[in-house]
Amino acid sequence: YFDGTTDYLIGPASYDFAPGTSDYMLELWWYPDDISTSSFFNIETGGLVLYYDGSTFRMDTRGGSNLINGTQAVPSHSWHHIVFCRSGTTGAIFYDGARIATGTVSTDLTATAEMQIGNISGLGGYDVNGYLAGWRWMNGSSAFDATSSTITVPTIPPRLNANTSHDANTKLLLNFTN
C-alpha cells in the first residue's frame, strides 16, 4: 500500500530503464484511494516519467516535453489496468483495455538516473495513494501493440517463464500483494 505521502520505491540508475529509441512498456494495475495525482514511473533528469495528474494520464520526459497524454476520469476504490507503451515511433496509453491516447514518440530516452515508483522527487503531490499490482517494465519490446485501438486486459498477473518472447525484455516485475 502506498500512503500518498511517504511510501515509494527507488531503484538504482540503469540502462534497463533507458530504452533509447527501442520499444518499451509499463503495465500495471492501480487501485486509487485518492485520484488527485499518481506517479507510476520516473527517471530523474531527462528520463521518462509516466503519471496521472488527476484528470489526464501523461507520458513525458522529466524536465522536458510532453510526449502524449489522454484525459480519463478514474473512479477511486476500484482496480484499473493501465499500459504506457511505444511500438516503433508510436506511443500509446491504454486504460482498462481502451486506447485513450496515441501519438508519435521518437524521443531518444537515454537518461540513467535513479528510477522511482510512486513519487516524482522535487514535485510534491505526485505520490501514489492506493495500491499497485502487476507492475511490469519492458525495455526492447512491448507485450501490447501501441497501434491497436484496444488490448485484451489480462486476467492473471504478469509472470516470467510464461513462454513468451517478451520474457527476456522484462527488466522489472513487481507483483505486489497487500
Image (cartoon, rainbow, N blue to C red):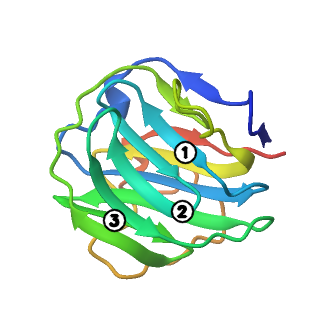
Spot occupied by residue 24 in the image (x, y as percentages of width and height): 32, 49
In this rendering, is residue 145 above or below 41?
below
Q: Residue at x 84, y 45 (%)?
A: 178
Local packing at callout 2 (Cα closer than 10 Å; few below 14, some 14-19, many 20+) is: many
Is residue 168 visible to the viewer in this orientation of the structure? no
Spot occupied by residue 114 in the image (x, y as percentages of width and height): 45, 20
Local packing at callout 1 (Cα closer than 10 Å; few below 14, some 14-19, many 20+) is: many
In this rendering, is residue 77 above or below 173?
below
Report the residue marked by disc 2.
Answer: 82
In this rendering, is residue 12 above or below 134?
above
Nearer-N-terminus badge (2/1): 1
Question: Real-space Cα distance between discs 3 and 1?
Answer: 15 Å
Which residue is situated farthest in the right direction here? 178
Q: Amino acid at mark 2?
A: Ile
Question: Real-space Cα distance between discs 2 and 1?
Answer: 10 Å
Q: Verify CB contact (< 8 Å) between mark 2 and mark 1.
A: yes
Q: Nearer the viewer, residue 147 or 8?
A: 8
Q: Is residue 123 left or right of residue 144?
A: right
Is residue 119 visible to the viewer in this orientation of the structure? yes
Report the residue marked by disc 1.
Answer: 40
Local packing at callout 3 (Cα closer than 10 Å; few below 14, some 14-19, many 20+) is: many
- Secondary structure beneath dot 1 equals strand
Q: Residue at x 50, y 49 (%)?
A: 51
Spot occupied by residue 11 in the image (x, y as percentages of width and height): 53, 22
- The quarter in which the N terminus is drawn is top right
Report the residue marked by disc 3.
Answer: 92
